[in-house]
Image (spheres, rainbow, N blue to C red):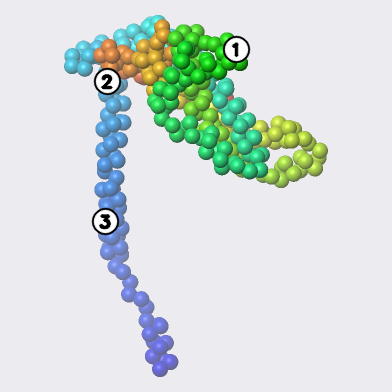
Amino acid sequence: MAKDHLKVIAQPDKQVPVGSHKQRKRKVQVTWYLFLIPSFLGILLFLVYPIFESFRLSFYQSNGTIEKFIGLQNFQTVLTSQPFWNSVWNTFYIGIFQIAIAIPLGFIFASLINTTPKGKNFFKVIYFLPNVTSIVAAAMIFAFVLHPEMGIVNYALEAVGLPTSQWLSDPSSSKWAVILLAVWHWIGFIIIICLANLQAISPEMYEAAKIDGASSFQQWLFITIPNMGGTFAFLLITGWIGALQRFNEVYVLGGPSGSPARSIQTMGAFIYERGFTGFEFGIASAATYIMFIIILVFTLINLKVSKMKL
């Protein structure tokens, strides 16, 4: 019986033919590609085709039905347009102050939450709620909150004896209304990203600094902040990209023309106004590619300054 058992063990397993294995692997690959076809079609129809069609339209005078080739005239029209450069100024003005306020404030809040012994998850949820709120809905609420006569902000300012503002009714203050909305909506994202980095810093560094006699503020200043460089660079770059593409909130608050007096019209709103209000699709397409170049150059500068690798 033992010999028979050894014979059974010694018999080699039946090998699967190499060709059969390759065919089975090829069938699995084909099956997965079939599932990916809808995604590929969506990318081609709604991303790749619009990019090339917009580039083609930038060389034509087009109202959607009649087209005439005019070369680089659309780019010249955009670059010599005062409303376009006004929209560029508005975009950078809102973006600069949004980033300058939101990133330091979000980092400070994240640091305070990180040192809180209890209720961290509660504060995370509370601060992150604005970020998951629809920006359109948030803009509509802010339009009511900042109303010069019925808004709660002016009511609170008046109650404590501070001067009120016309906010969205005055070109001199309308940009700050958009900045307040942008900071409120984005700060939750900053807090979550900063918290993730703060919790990744080794506790041994703080323990060593504490043994050497460093205060809590000195630990925050000389350990926490230097270890947040990569996070700050990431937030700076993503913040600028989002700021330069700003459209939804300014459209809800001021329409395509950025009322009052085009004071909050951004580059995105300018493109929408010329394309879908004035039916000047060639000019809108040219402005789109100029905005793309501005975003690309500014992103490369940020990457160079922050020394962040792609």
| Residue shown at 66% from the left, 39% from the top | 115
Residue linked to disc 3: 27
Give the residue drawn at x 40%, y 17%: 253
Residue 123 lies left or right of residue 52; in this view the side is right
* Residue 52: quarter of image: top left
Q: Position of residue 146 (x, y in %)?
A: 47, 17
Can residue 202 be seen in the rendering of this structure?
yes
Mark 3: secondary structure = helix
**Which residue is the site of mark 2?**
56
- At label 1, the amino acid type is Leu
Residue 51: horizontal and vertical position, in percent? 31, 26
* Mark 3 nearby-residue class (10 Å; few <14, some 14–19, many ≥20): few
**Closest to the observer, 121 or 258:** 121
Residue 138 found in image quarter: top left
- Disc nearer the start of the sequence (1/2): 2
Left-right relation of 215 to 148: right
Q: Which residue is mark 1?
A: 162
Please give the name of the residue rendered at 31% of the width and 13% of the height, measured from the top-left corner: 274
